[in-house]
Amino acid sequence: MRTSSFLKRINIFSDLDSKELAIIAHYLNPLKAVRDTVLCKEGDKGDELFIVRKGTIASAIKLPDGNQKQIAQFKGGNFFGEMAIFENAPRSATCFALEKSELFTMHKNDFYKALEDHPEIAISIMYKMLSIISQRLRNTGKFLSEMVRWGNEASRRAITDSLTGVYNRRYLDTALHDQFNACLSQDRPLAIMMIDLDYFREINEQYSNEVGNKALCEVTKVFKELLSKKDVIARYGGDEFTILLPNKNLKQAALLAEDIRSKVEALTMLKSVKGDLKQITLSIGIACFPESAKDLTAIKEMADKALYAAKEQGRNRVISA
């Protein structure tokens, strides 16, 4: 009788009479949970609907960084876990007790038996339940959309350089192997361009780190203007960049490198500040698969040696391996 009285206060059962409530109560199983008891885990197979009688139950989802984010709380009279029954789907969240709690559970087999044996009761319950679920999904959908945007932004930050917006070294290490393997399997060329800003230390010392950062950003703009979307631009170190040029041979890469060098040399930002250096210039070394070498390690070494040669020969020049 106490159970029927409690069920009457629950929205989804509020239209049922005492006889109908007694029928529903027959399908419910009591459950007690102490604080931190996990009732269901995200990703697990779900086969129970939960109704909170006393206490507070929280639901949380796992974020891309491995932490958990609480998305809802269920108190006395609330239900949860219904989607695992309706859609035969895995649990979308982990649910656990925030305090000592009492619940009722209904197994999905009992739920469908109740629908079959008492369709008039089922229609009343389902109508109210679906209304509540629809609102819950709208609220959760908004939250999850924000989480997706947050996750995408976090992923982008993890692989890009915060100053220039190009890829960082972490991404470059992966991209080098992926691009090389793709070109190797498809018998296409891959050029690697290694670039240093000339006298970058002097720019920072004579002007400021702020001016040095601006120089890096100006150079990056030139890269983006002259390179295609298929090319990979990465800031390898402080003033060091690596550019991957799929489908370009050594001659094509050298012509493009010369265009980059020339356009950077024409930048005027240092002419407006007091100091000895009035130009930003680049030293560029290039190597290519398969012309320069046939394995990735050798290509990288040859591009690095070509860069060193460009600096040794006076800087502000392009050297091909």
Image: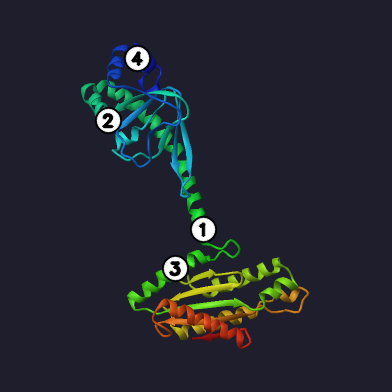
Disc 1 secondary structure class: helix
Left or right: 244 as drawn, with respect to 203: left
Q: CA distance from mark 4 to mark 3?
A: 63 Å
Residue type, numbered disc 2 = Lys
**What whole-number distance in Å separates the C-alpha atoms at marks 2 and 1?**
42 Å
The residue type indicated by label 4 comes to: Ser
Q: Which mark is residue 289?
A: none
Res. 307 image quadrant:
bottom right
Q: Is residue 30 left or right of residue 250?
A: left
Residue in the picture at 23% in, 21% down: 118
Among all residues in the image, which is located at the extreme bottom?
313
2 vs 1, front mark: 1
Name the residue that disc number 4 marks: 4
Task: Identify the mark at residue 158; answer none if there is no mark.
Answer: 1
- Closer to the N terminus: mark 4 or mark 3? 4
Note whether residue 251 is visible: yes
The amino acid type of the residue labelled 1 equals Ala
Identify the residue position indicated by label 3 in the image.
175
Disc 4 or disc 3, which is closer to the eye? 3
Mark closer to the chain start, 4 or 1: 4
Pinpoint residue 150: horizontal percent, then vertical percent.
50, 49
Please report whichever mark, 1 or 3, sits nearer to the chain's N-terminal start.
1
Q: Earlier in the sequence, mark 2 or mark 4?
A: 4
x and y percent of residue 277 in the render? 73, 79
| Residue at x 66%, y 74% (from the top left corner) | 200
